[in-house]
Image (spheres, helix red, strand yellow):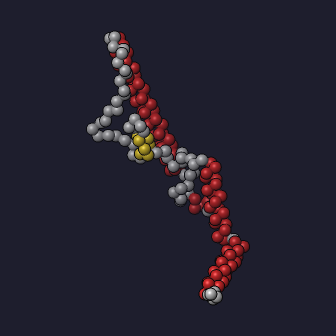
Amino acid sequence: MPLKLLKHKSWNVYSEQNKERVRNDEEAARRAEDAEEQRMQQEDAAVRLSLLRRSSQGRTSAPPPEPTVTTALTPVAPKRVVAERPSGLVKPIEPWYKSRVAAGEADQERRERARLRGDASDPLHLMNAYVDQTIRHRESRQRRHSRKHRISK
């Protein structure tokens, strides 16, 4: 693609708009991660505090309470949700530029696509396919002919 047209493409990774989008997505992911970490710390602190209060009152025989997940009347969830964790929390989808398929899988898929694309445009492959088709057709014709003209006893 000529470089003078590249700046007009929405998928241009070097455009300032896309760079800013990446920065914003990374910042939003970092903030969400920090908020989640802080919420988990507060929840752990509350559990530890209740455990300490119980032990100070002499009721150590009771098992520690399970952390409860409180639900707001109007749940606030990230825009994009992949799956729910066992504790009922939602995990946001990573942006497209952060998701990575295993390098071996992506490389293998790319090679397979290139092989198929090359096969479709390779004249030798086309000739071999035509020869194979001709041989299969000839063999099927011979089988039909031999069945039709079989000598019955």
Instruction: Reply above or below: 88 against 115.
Output: above
Residue 100 in sight from this viewpoint: yes
Q: Residue furthest left?
A: 73
For the point 64% across and 49% down, which residue is it? Answer: 104
Residue 64: x and y, percent? Answer: 37, 21
- Report the number of numbered marks: 0
Res. 111 image quadrant: bottom right
For the point 65% across and 78% down, which residue is it? Answer: 136
Instruction: Reply above or below: 75 against 62.
Output: below
For the point 64% across and 53% down, which residue is it? Answer: 107
The residue closer to the viewer here, 59 or 10, is: 59
**Residue 19 located left or right of residue 133:** left
Residue 123 in sight from this viewpoint: no
Q: Residue furthest right?
A: 124
Instruction: Reply above or below: 31 against 130.
Output: above
**Residue 101 located left or right of residue 51:** right
Q: Residue furthest front?
A: 153
Residue 38: x and y, percent? Answer: 42, 29
Res. 75 image quadrant: top left
Residue 89: x and y, percent? Answer: 39, 37
**Quadrant location, the N terminus:** bottom right
Instruction: Reply above or below: 147 against 44.
Output: below
Residue 49: x and y, percent? Answer: 37, 18
For the point 62% across and 87% down, which residue is it? Answer: 153
